[in-house]
Amino acid sequence: MANPLSESDVRHIATLGRLQLSNDEIAMMTEELSAIVGYVDQLNEVDVEGVVPTAHAVDVQNVFRDDVVRDSIGSDKALANAPERDKTFFKVPKVLDQDTV
């Protein structure tokens, strides 16, 4: 098992996480994080000889269709239900003042 974390380690981790912990919280987190690191360290004891590394526990396949170029629907069809249009564009109310752009 790895060495347990020290209070100094936990204070450093808290600083990295921008956490302000009291001395009681530091003591509690030192104990809890040391236990977590101990559990994770147990994985080093598992015999993985001959096990193929995988990203998923089950076989995962891409379910997306092939990316095939095809004709678009065109602006007339796209704008068919638009409340207002200006030539080949959607016409919408102005939301910004010209001075702020």
Image: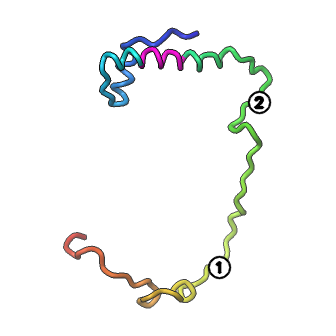
Vertical side of 82 occupied by 41: above or below: above
Q: Residue at x 19, y 73 (%)?
A: 99
- Name the residue tied to disc 2: 52
Query: Main structural element of the magenta stretch: helix, strand or loop?
Result: helix
The residue positioned farthest toward the right in the image shown: 50
**Image x and y of residue 66, in percent:** 72, 63
Indicate the amino acid at tag 2: Val
SS at mark 1 in the image: loop
How would you rate the neighbour count of disc 1 (Cα within 10 Å): few for under 14, some for 14-19, many for 20 or more? few
**Does the magenta run of residues contain 90?**
no
Vertical side of 32 occupied by 17: above or below: below
Q: Residue at x 72, y 31 (%)?
A: 53
| Residue 30 placement, left or right of 101 | right
| Residue 26 placement, left or right of 33 | left
**Image x and y of residue 42, in percent:** 63, 16
- Tell me the magenta residue range: 29-37
Which quadrant of the structure image shows residue 93? bottom left
- Name the residue tied to disc 1: 71
**Does the magenta run of residues contain 32?**
yes
SS at mark 2 in the image: loop
- According to the image, what is the colour scheme of the structure? rainbow
Q: Which disc, if any, is residue 91?
A: none
